[in-house]
Image (cartoon, helix red, strand yellow):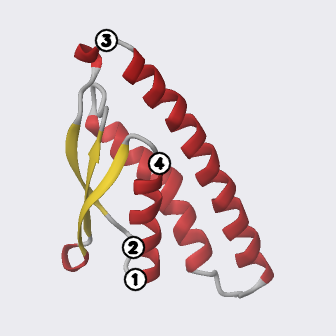
Amino acid sequence: MRFRQVLLFLRYGLILLREIWLSAITVTKLVLGPVDRLRSGFLALPMDATSDLEITSLANSITLTPGTITVHVEPAKHTIVIHAIDVGADPEDVRQSIKTVLEANILAWTRPRRPQ
């Protein structure tokens, strides 16, 4: 593993810790608030992740984050199904958040750029 990959892996670890912390606060507020505010649901998320390491890292990261859990992974169709305690007004926001915050950072350290 190159030095750059190690740094990207450490950055991902910090990002994941931040997401776990922020999600824990959000879930606490949801649980202590009125039940009618919850909009739980299942979401199918298309993945750019292809290797076993990438898919497993993404699935485990989703499950580690409070309020979300990985329900099913379909590697052949590059899709992951998750359940979220609160999908909000627009489920697409949840999908984009997972793709840009979690998946993009996983792919950064698992797919090293080759020098040109």
Tally of numbered discs:
4
- The three-letter amino acid code for the residue at tag 1 is Asp
**CB under 8 Å between discs 2 and 3:** no
Residue 112 position within the rendered picture, expressed as x and y whole percent measured from the top left: 62, 81
Q: Residue at x 69, y 54 (%)?
A: 14
- Quadrant location, the N terminus: bottom right
* Label 1: few (<14), some (14–19) or many (≥20) C-alpha neighbours in 10 Å: few
- The three-letter amino acid code for the residue at tag 3 is Pro
Looking at this view, name the residue that lies furthest to the front.
Answer: 32
**Cα distance between the residues tagged 3 and 4:** 22 Å
Where does label 4 land, which residue? 65
Q: In the rendering, which numbered label is found on residue 34? A: 3
- As helix, strand or loop, the secondary structure at mark 3 comes to loop
**Cα distance between the residues tagged 2 and 4:** 16 Å
- The three-letter amino acid code for the residue at tag 2 is Ile
What is the quadrant of residue 73 in the picture? bottom left
Q: Residue at x 59, y 53 (%)?
A: 16
- The three-letter amino acid code for the residue at tag 4 is Thr
Eye-nearest disc, 2 or 4: 4
Eye-nearest disc, 2 or 3: 3
Where does label 2 land, which residue? 55
- Quadrant location, the C terminus: bottom right
Looking at this view, name the residue that lies furthest to the right.
Answer: 3
102 w.r.t. 85: above or below: below
Q: In the rendering, which numbered label is found on residue 52? A: 1
Q: Residue at x 38, y 23 (%)?
A: 31
Q: Residue at x 55, y 45 (%)?
A: 20
Label located before the other in sequence (2 or 4): 2
**CB under 8 Å between discs 4 and 1:** no
Residue 111 position within the rendered picture, expressed as x and y whole percent measured from the top left: 56, 80
**Cα distance between the residues tagged 1 and 2:** 5 Å
